[in-house]
Image (cartoon, rainbow, N blue to C red):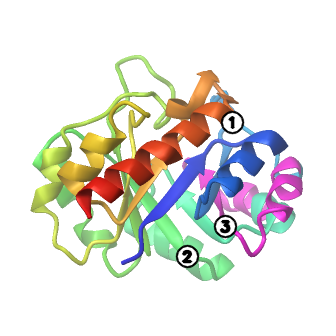
Amino acid sequence: MTFDIKICGLKTEAAVNAALGNGASHIGFIFFEKSPRHIEPDEAHRLREGARGKAKAVAVTVDADDAVLDAIVSAMSPDMIQLHGKETPQRASEVKQRYGLPVMKAFAVSTPDDLALIAPYRGIADRFLFDAKPPKGSDLPGGNGVSFDWRLLAALDRDVDYMLSGGLNVGNIGDALRQTNPPGIDISSGVESAPGIKDPALIEEFFAAIRAARAQMA
């Protein structure tokens, strides 16, 4: 498996350029109105155009119906759809078939039982994303800046392709990589100066921390 880095919740050209310039394999655009990272499909399309051939553009959705997904896919032409809500295996399969695109299914993790929930999605979801459970009172399924016990991921079958998410930042990414050695990572709030405001300098520092940690691990 290759090691992938996804910068999620992008809203500006400067942030997209910082992600691409530092080697992001995926860039994520969030379509969820309650999120400070919400973006309209037309704007996401404009921003993702500069990434063609450089990084995969991911449309992040939360329990979106066909009409919403139709509008996103038509306007943006994503490379992948991320399902970050309570979508069932049947729904994930329907989305894959309707758009002919790979699907990444997100799961909120706090106990080993949460990881067991991926079983019926195996063979349907092309990739998984493991995030922390939202804090009490949060309206956001992700991007809350909290992490979970990464040691839980040791129980996963080795062939499970996933991205590690939740509370990652410059200060803890080294520990996260050493503990889990994940196939990919996803970061949003950890490279922001304020909710929804990506900081190009923090993005650059984050990639530098990844390179240092991976060099040490090698």
Q: Residue 199 appears in which quarter of the rendering?
A: top right
Quarter of the rendering occupied by the N terminus: bottom left
Kind of residue indicated by mark 2: Pro
Q: In the image, residue 88 lies at what x, y percent? A: 40, 61
Q: Nearer the viewer, mark 2 or mark 1?
A: 1
Q: For mark 2, what is the residue?
A: 102
How packed mark 2 is, by other alpha carbons closer than 10 Å (few <14, some 14-19, many 20 or more), is many
Which residue corresponds to the image point at 71% horizontal and 60% vertical from the top-left? Answer: 69
Front in this rendered view, residue 21 or 8? 21
- Marks 2 and 1, the one that precedes in the sequence: 2
Q: Residue at x 62, y 21 (%)?
A: 193
Q: CA distance from mark 3 to mark 2?
A: 15 Å
Which is more foreground, mark 3 or mark 2? 3
- Judged left or right of residue 70, residue 209 is left
The residue nearer to you, when weighing 51 against 120, is: 51
Name the one closer to the observer, 51 or 144: 51
- State the image coordinates of residue 75 (x, y, percent, origin top left): 86, 62
Magenta span includes 118: no
Q: Relative to 214, is 103 above or below?
A: below
Separation of residues labelled 2 and 1 (CA atoms): 29 Å
**Decide: marks 1, 3 in contact (CB < 8 A)?**
no
Which residue position holds label 1?
A: 200
Query: Which residue is at 35% across, 19% downward?
Result: 136
Name the amino acid, label 3: Ala
Residue type, mark 1 in image: Pro
- Label 3 Cα crowd, 10 Å radius (few <14 / some 14-19 / many 20+): many
Q: Secondary structure at mark 2?
A: loop
- The residue where tag 3 is placed is 55
First of labels 3, 2 by sequence position: 3
Q: Residue at x 59, y 46 (%)?
A: 8
Residue range corresponding to the magenta coloring: 43-70
Tell me if residue 170 comes above or below residue 58 in the rendering: above
